[in-house]
Image: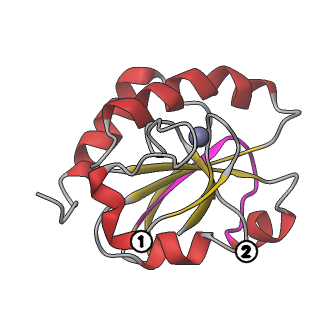
Amino acid sequence: MQIKCPHCNKENRFPIDKLSSIPKCGICHRGLLSVPITLNQSNIDELLTQKILPVLIDFWAPWCGPCKMFAPTFQAGAEKFAGKIVFAKVDTEAEQMLGAKYNIRSIPTLVYFWQSKELGRVSGALPPAQLNELALQLAQLSSAK
Ligand SMILES: [Zn+2]
């Protein structure tokens, strides 16, 4: 899978089956998945079709106040559930095709996936306790033990 390191912004590639072992950036050596990863049209399908970890996507936009307020909550979740759930973000401003494809009508919207299927979605910024509860349920699906 090809993603930009969320810390140093350098392109990284790692085998998708290494997802649960929390791959590190080849340049700065920090965890690539301990912060939400940025998805785009070229890497989202590979992530959604893998069968190792459930995926939780925050559809957001830079101009959205509630999205910005929710970002630290989502970030904390990514850190806590690294290796169990992939936390990812789609900037619906930069990736308008993805916003349309996944039928995002308001932001922030969280959509969660397991093995290519959408399991559910929730709109609006979740309080940390609710995000934690959702993540605990999702984490049980993980086939990484
Ligand atoms: Zn890096």
Q: Is residue 11 above or below residue 109?
A: below
Write down the residue under mark 2: 101
Query: Along the line of sight, which residue is nearer the eye, 17 or 38?
Result: 17
Task: Specify the farthest residue to the left.
Answer: 145
- Residue sitting at x 57%, y 77%: 45
Specify the farthest residue to the front.
27
- SS of the residue at dot 2? helix
At x 55%, y 36%, the residue is: 28
Mark 1 — residue?
A: 15
Q: Is residue 140 left or right of residue 44?
A: left
Three-letter code, disc 2: Lys
User: Is residue 136 depicted above or below 38 in this figure?
Assistant: above
Quarter location, residue 2: bottom right
Residues rendered magenta in the picture: 102-113
Q: Position of residue 142 (x, y in %)?
A: 22, 60
How many other residues sit within 10 Å of disc 2, few (<14), some (14-19) or many (≥20)?
few
**Pointer 1 local density, CA inside 10 Å: few below 14, some 14–19, many at least 20:** few
The front one of 88 and 63 is 88
Which three-letter amino acid code belongs to the residue tagged 1?
Answer: Pro
Depth order, front residue of 143/23: 23
Q: Quadrant of the C terminus?
A: bottom left
Q: Residue 122: percent from the left, percent from the top?
A: 53, 47
- Nearer mark to the viewer, of 2 and 1: 1
